[in-house]
Image (tube, helix red, strand yellow):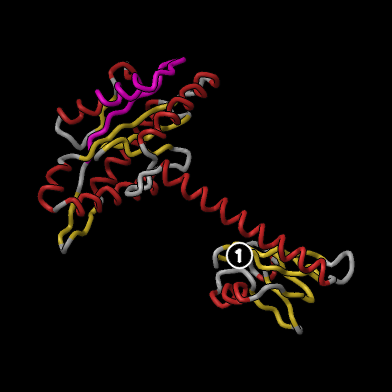
Amino acid sequence: MMMRTDGHWQALVGSAREGRRELERAHERIADGTLVGDRGARAADLVSAEGHLCLPMTAGGVSVGVLGVPDSAGPFSDGRRRVLATAATLLGISLRNAQLFREVKDHTLRDGLTGCFNRTHAMGIIDLELRRARRSQMSVSLIMFDLDRFKEVNDRNGHLCGDAVLAAVGALMRDVLRGSDFKCRYGGEEFLVLLPETPLEGAKRVADTLRHDLSEMAIQWKGEMLTITASFGVTTAMPSEIDVKALIGRADVALYRAKDQGRDCVRLSVDTAT
């Protein structure tokens, strides 16, 4: 939001550090006019709205927004200003609490190292997706992969290096996979990728892409360039299947066939490939 005072526009909320500091210092402002728009919007895209009372919404020293109130009922009395200032304060606290709650909830669902969802949350999501697939008669597939010889990376370079590798894998998954693909750190160096509305052939193509991109990834560690490979198992849900453990079990069996057959490869579940 921008404010015009004495014929000049100035930022109240936006990317400009100065505007943010001004917002935090201000208790309330009367504007001759305001420009309203999304953060980062061009001036030409902002909407003009004359005569607003602009009140910063802050909580704990953090700016969370601006409450803009039009003066359609006439000039603002001192009483109205006090009421609106109190409302802006309460709204700021509520918005900040909602942000903090969302952050805490997200931390309980995600692995802090890779950014992937954790195993407990994954089990619930897979169950929901299996039931949804059964109702809609759509395919749902699962990829399980395990980093090859990861223990050697830890033993040779230390656990901090191993953590750097895992974080890089999580970042690559976010880059390669769709937003709708569910990414999970299943445990240690094992990962799951749930692919809604994706048949087995499509899941294999995704696994092939992940395998290739992982093998091409270079991780710098103390002047050394590290490379990593992974073995993949791919399966798809049977018609009307709702057994999460059975689905994961088939992907796991296919994964260990990939390990037994030389690593750095993709193998399909025998039950779903035939």
Percent x, y of residue 234: 32, 28
Residue at the image position 32 percent from the left and 49 percent from the top: 113
Residue 36: name its quadrant.
bottom right
Percent x, y of residue 47: 74, 65
Write the start and end of the magenta stretch as one range.
230-253
Q: Nearer the viewer, residue 185 or 25?
A: 25
Residue at the image position 87 percent from the left and 72 percent from the top: 75
Q: Quadrant of the N terminus?
A: bottom right
Is 142 situated above or below 79? Answer: above
Tell how many labels: 1
Is 244 situated above or below 210? Answer: above
Q: Amino acid at mark 1?
A: Thr
Residue that carries the numbered disc 1 in the rendered image:
58
User: Residue reaching furthest bottom?
Assistant: 6
Residue at the image position 29 percent from the left and 25 percent from the top: 268
Drawn side of residue 90 relative to residue 194, left or right:
right
Drawn side of residue 66 relative to residue 149, left or right:
right
Percent x, y of residue 200: 38, 26
Does the magenta-highlighted stretch encompass residue 70?
no
Characterize the local packing of mark 1: few (<14), some (14-19) or many (20 or more) Cα atoms within 10 angstroms: many
Q: Nearer the viewer, residue 265 or 78?
A: 78
Q: Nearer the viewer, residue 106 or 170?
A: 106
Does the magenta-highlighted stretch encompass residue 240?
yes
